[in-house]
Amino acid sequence: MGWQHTVGGRVWRFEDLRTLLARATPERSGDQLAGLAASCDAERMAAKLALAELPLATFLSEALVPYEADEVTRLIVDGHDAAAFAPVRHLTVGDFRDWLLSAAADTEALAALAPGLTPEMVAAVSKLMRHQDLLLVASKCRVVTAFRDTIGLPGRLAVRLQPNHPTDDLRGIAASVLDGLMYGCGDAVIGINPASDSLVLIGELLRLLDGVIQRHAIPTQGCVLTHVTNTLRLIEQGLPVDLVFQSIAGSQKANAGFGIDLALLREAQAAALSLNRGTVGRNVMYFETGQGSALSADAHHGVDQQTMEARAYGVARAYAPLLVNTVVGFIGPEYLVDGKQIVRAGLEDHCCGKLLGLPLGCDICHTNHAEADADDMDTLMTLLGSAGVNFIMGVPGADDILLGYQSTSFHDAAVLRELLGLRRAPEFEAWLAQAGIAGADGRLLPALQRHALLADLSAR
């Protein structure tokens, strides 16, 4: 079976569904590297036109990655909710795009539909969308999660406070935590990427975070972003684990490259839930993803990188995560070469994740060897803020000195909140007012020289 369409007087043929999706994808360096991209704009347009005529239900009968060989495909297929899908089952991909942009696709309708959509469906429809379409559809999706505070409510924007240090120096990390909290950041999570795999050192980092959170009764959660097997061992040792972190991808082979499978994630989720450390909710998982991860592991099965990214969201959805973060420009220019491609990918990821019912946030970032700069990141940050992104990153000075890439800063978040009138998670915002860091209206107050946080963290 194949598809074809005529553009520019030439008939363009696409021999299978993988090829059709890849050729319809907006230009990006990763698909070119994999030999999957359209050869020219005419072929790309022909693929989009053919894709628009494809029945949406085709994705229920044709697997891009074989069912028998891939547990991610089995998870997606076996978990599909036919009843939820029924209202749009008769649509083509193009009709589905039109419906998503209509008034009928309101917040309630999209929430009810989410279990009936597969990652391949949302990836396909996103390929037919302009930026404004991706923004409008995502803005109508609301995904609310909770642990010690509530994330994803309308008119709210959370921030992950990311206090990384190249040598895991506790005083350096404490200084960054203080800086971020005084900027009103940290309601998504205070999350440290450790430089070391030492369980002893990771335990010290967990105790540091837990000590600050508990002593000052901060309604947020801490996380050390180590491998899931390390987190399981730390839970067994009685360490104060709030969230389980893991990077995930869209195929079994790619996840094996991360040293994980679905059963391991389920075990870790159960272990974290057994601790009962949440106060307002029980979402205990934190996942990170990124376009190009499956390709970089030679585990993409001939599928374009954006569709593989959406399949990673199919994995995340099974574990009711608190946070899902697309680290959009981190993997490098081999996959997203410049600011234009990074912006497009960030909008796609956010829209696709939200359509699948996930609490999507974005690390709005680029590596130093990509053709991108802070202006590109400002553009993506503002667009995502207007589309209702659940959270972004807060990195001291926007420059992560451990991971060596450029992200968004504490003051970037402050600007975005003021620009778009966005508030923090309600429980966290109330704590900021009680602590004298922000007023009742959410606006930051001048820093107090003798603030209790300053005295505490200065002694770390």
Image (cartoon, grey):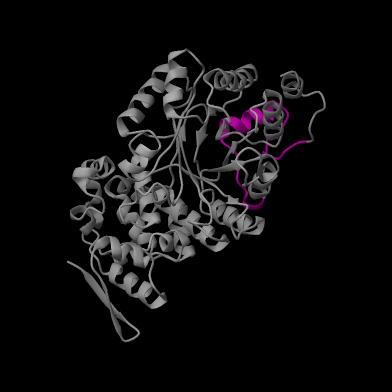
Name the foreground residue: 413 vs 30. 30
- The image quarter in which residue 62 lies: bottom left
Please indicate, yes or no, whether residue 276 appears anywhere in the rendered image. Answer: no
Residue 99 is situated, as x and y percent measured from the top left of the image, at 33, 62
Residue 280 is situated, as x and y percent measured from the top left of the image, at 47, 26
Left or right placement of residue 62 versus residue 348 in this view: left
- The image quarter in which residue 411 lies: top right
Please indicate, yes or no, whether residue 178 appears anywhere in the rendered image. Answer: yes
Left or right placement of residue 384 versus residue 348 in this view: right
**Relative to residue 260, is residue 232 depicted above or below?**
above
Left or right placement of residue 112 versus residue 426 in this view: left
The residue at 23%/56% (across/down) is 59
- The image quarter in which residue 18 lies: bottom left
Quadrant of the rendering where the N terminus is positioned: bottom left
Q: Is residue 232 magenta?
A: no
Q: Which residues are magenta?
A: 419-445
The residue at 51%/48% (across/down) is 389
Name the foreground residue: 128 vs 249. 249
